[in-house]
């Protein structure tokens, strides 16, 4: 009897445990055992919407997103399903992308609008006129950026979430938003001294700019004239750039043609410098004695006609660099 009683208790415990586990898994996994109906919706923007995201009616999950594709190159076609047996999608149903939380998760909300509410056939498409994308949080929070700078991260998160819920029509009441707004106002009041200094500094900057408004105006006018002049001369400037390119190409060719002769001259100068260095003693003696001898010859030549020079013949014979370039002969 004790064994039978223990076995019954074990079986009951196992059944209850398995039932609770299955119920928990179904709840966590959002499994649905009934049939579903597939629909489509055209959106102008579904940024952040992913396959598997929820489809909700009044906050209750009734379906999920099955796929997203491009339609007409500029729009998005979202395919989703909802539980069968409910008239959830009608000719007046609006599909709106909403934020699930501040992390960025989104879902599609089905909202009944004005109209007769005739059920749509399975596979029908909700047109673009009855859909709306999610709020652009970038533009929204940029407007509150000066306010957020003076607040703590927790206040910013709470206030932002209340704004999103209120704008999406999900806030329980406006009292919560007003309460957070009052808290933010108190925080700003505690920082009135900092704000006052900021405004004072801004006034000083604006006063300085105002004192130099004429110079600033002249600078803007001159800059406008300069830009206008560049615009009027854009053809000439373009032609100049083209001509500069041609000049650079010609110069490159000139340097290339002159490089071999210059190289030979440099080599010859190197040989000359080497010869002078080898005969350094003779060169030094010549340079030291030449000025005195030149003065003596000059005095003798200026005193009387002691020197007569006659050029009888001069010829130039082209040839190799080793040959003598020219020769002169004395008169007989």
Image: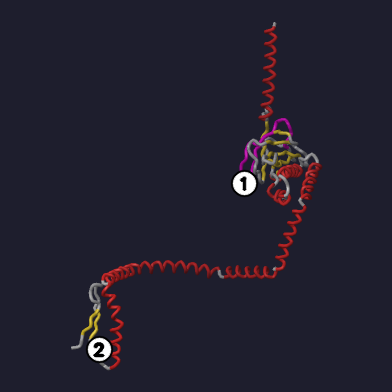
Identify the magenta region. 63-89
Q: Which residue is mark 2?
A: 309
Badge 2 crowding class, 10 Å Cα cut-off, few under 14, some 14 to 19, many 20 or more, is few
Up/down of 22 relative to 311, above or below: above
Which of the pair 181/207 is nearer the observer? 207
Q: Quadrant of residue 31?
A: top right
Residue shown at the point (66%, 45%) measured from the top left: 45
User: Quick one: SS at disc 2?
Assistant: loop
Picture quadrant where residue 271 is located: bottom left
Whether residue 86 is in magenta: the answer is yes
Residue at point 76%, 43% (across, down): 166
Q: Position of residue 267 (x, y in %)?
A: 30, 68
**Quarter in which the C terminus is drawn:** bottom left
Q: How is the image coloured?
A: secondary structure
Q: Is residue 329 left or right of residue 161?
A: left
Q: Position of residue 13 (x, y in %)?
A: 69, 16
Which of pointers 1 and 2 lies earlier in the amino acid sequence? 1
At label 1, counting other C-alpha atoms closer than 10 Å, the crowd grade (few under 14, some 14-19, many 20 or more) is few
Q: How far is mark 1 from mark 2, CA to CA?
A: 104 Å
**In this view, 271 is above or below 111:** below
Q: Nearer the viewer, residue 237 or 298?
A: 298
Residue tagged 1: 72
Residue 132, image x, y percentages = 70, 44
């Amino acid at each position: 009897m004790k064994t039978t009683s223990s076995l019954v208790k074990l079986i009951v415990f196992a059944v209850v445990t398995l039932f609770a586990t299955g119920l928990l898994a179904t709840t966590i996994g959002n499994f649905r055992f009934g049939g579903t109906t597939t629909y489509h919706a055209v959106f102008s923007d579904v940024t952040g919407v992913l396959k598997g995201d929820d489809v909700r009616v009044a906050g209750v999950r009734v379906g999920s997103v099955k796929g997203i594709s491009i339609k007409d190159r500029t729009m998005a076609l979202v395919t989703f399903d909802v539980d069968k047996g409910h008239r959830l999608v009608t000719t007046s149903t609006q599909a709106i992308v909403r934020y699930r939380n501040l992390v960025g998760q989104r879902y599609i909300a089905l909202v009944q609008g004005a109209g007769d509410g005739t059920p749509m056939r399975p596979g029908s498409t909700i047109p673009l006129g009855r859909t709306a994308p999610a709020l652009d949080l970038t533009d929204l929070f940029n407007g509150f950026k000066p306010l957020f700078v003076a607040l703590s991260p927790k206040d910013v998160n709470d206030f932002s979430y209340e704004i999103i819920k209120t704008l999406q029509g999900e806030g329980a009441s406006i009292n919560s938003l007003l309460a957070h707004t009052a808290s933010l106002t108190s925080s700003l009041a505690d920082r009135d001294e900092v704000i006052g200094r900021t405004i004072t500094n801004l006034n000083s900057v604006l006063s300085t700019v105002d004192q130099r408004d004429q110079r600033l105006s002249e600078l803007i006018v001159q800059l406008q004239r300069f830009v206008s002049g560049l615009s009027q001369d854009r053809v000439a400037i373009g032609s100049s750039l083209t001509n500069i390119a041609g000049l650079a190409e010609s110069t490159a060719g000139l340097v290339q043609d002159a490089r071999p002769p210059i190289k030979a001259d440099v080599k010859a100068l190197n040989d000359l410098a080497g010869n002078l260095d080898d005969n350094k003693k003779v060169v030094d003696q010549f340079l030291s004695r030449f000025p005195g001898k030149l003065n003596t010859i000059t005095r003798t030549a200026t005193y009387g006609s002691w020197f007569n020079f006659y050029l009888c013949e001069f010829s130039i014979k082209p040839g190799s660099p080793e040959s003598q370039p020219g020769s002169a002969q004395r008169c007989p």
